[in-house]
Image (cartoon, rainbow, N blue to C red):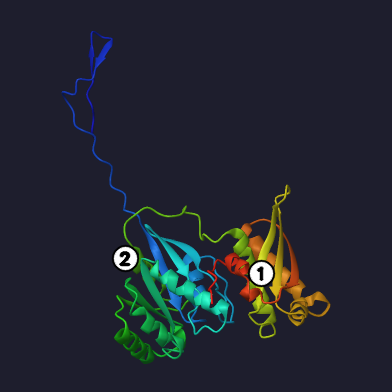
Amino acid sequence: MAETVCRKLNGNMTENDNIIGTEPEPAAAAAATRSGFVALIGTTNAGKSTLLNRLVGAKVSIVSHKVQTTRAIVRGIAIHKTAQIVFMDTPGIFKPRRRLDRAMVMSAWGGAKDADLIMLLIDSERGLRGDADAILQGLKDVHQPKILVLNKIDRVDPESLLKLTAAANEVVEFERTFMVSATTGSGCTDLLDFLTDRLPEGPWYYPEDQISDLPMRQLAAEITREKLFLRLHQELPYASHVETEKWEERKDGSVRIEQVIYVERDSQKKIALGKNGDAIKAISTASRKELSEILEQPVHLFLFVKVRENWGDDPERFREMGLEFPRG
């Protein structure tokens, strides 16, 4: 044990003369922290949001069986060992047709180019058909390090997985290939271990208990939008948008939230409301229940449906979604 010797002089004076003793031993060095941004890209419905929620360990991105449910970049924050991994769940990349489609694809590629590492997620069942091959071609011009993640491996035989791995690596040079199931969690720990070692040393960007940088008002709108998709399936197309217009913390510890569901036509409004208001009531109940669990407080949720023609051409709606409005 290190010590500093002090001598008493004349019974009452202390002299710290530094003649005898040793310097204090340095404390054991704490493991260096690591942090960085990982862009999660892929085709629509490849399972990006499901994987993000699995890796973060909490719900930060909406999930439904309908494609294109993620519209803007959602950051989910995972803590694994000494690393803080900031995942950027980007919109699915696909051939855009509408202005909103173009904004989503622009957002996805922009997020990829801002990241420390790019993680391409491919649906093992669909393989490289359709947009997946186009994404691989686009990655040739992206200089960040890249890893390949094959999802839904529980639905594909091992030989097909090996062929898919070889085909993708022929087009783009990936540092590593991982095979996971976002639904069951298989392979996810190995993926987190790799990312922890791969990201650069540095301080964490966010507090330890924060799981997303998505504003709570926007997350609440995303939750309601998910319930809208799950309830209405094919009846209501993507011509709908949810905004949180009012958020009031009440003295009794509850929160009052008012949200507006925007649609483009009166016929869509009738679908969103449902017969005798059944649809909107079911959406509100499901959303309120999940929001109460996330916020850990009682939620009073009020939903309104408004018709706003051509909201998909309104720059203000794009800003609300965190997207850049594409001109032309």
Residue 181: tell me if it is visible. Answer: yes
Give percent across and percent down for residue 120: 40, 77
For the point 41% across and 86% down, which residue is it?
A: 134
Give percent across and percent down for residue 73: 50, 68
Q: Which residue is mark 1?
A: 242
Residue closest to the far top: 10
Rate crowding at label 2 as few (under 14), some (14 to 19) or many (20 or more) other CA atoms within 10 Å. some
Q: Quadrant of residue 38?
A: bottom left
Q: Nearer the viewer, residue 325 or 197?
A: 325
Give percent across and percent down for residue 274: 78, 79
For the point 38% across and 81% down, which residue is it?
A: 138
Residue 183: tell me if it is visible. Answer: no
Residue 125 falls left or right of residue 10:
right
Q: Nearer the viewer, residue 222 or 14?
A: 222
In the structure shown, which secondary structural element does the residue marked by tag 2 occupy?
helix
**Marks 1,2: beta carbons within 8 A:** no
Q: Amino acid at mark 1?
A: Val
Q: Amino acid at mark 2?
A: Arg
Residue 17 falls left or right of residue 126:
left
Q: Nearer the viewer, residue 310 or 328?
A: 328
Quarter of the picture containing the N terminus is: top left
Q: Quadrant of residue 39?
A: bottom left
Q: Give the number of the disc on residue 198.
A: 2
- Disc 1/disc 2 C-alpha distance (Å): 38 Å
Q: Nearer the viewer, mark 1 or mark 2?
A: 1
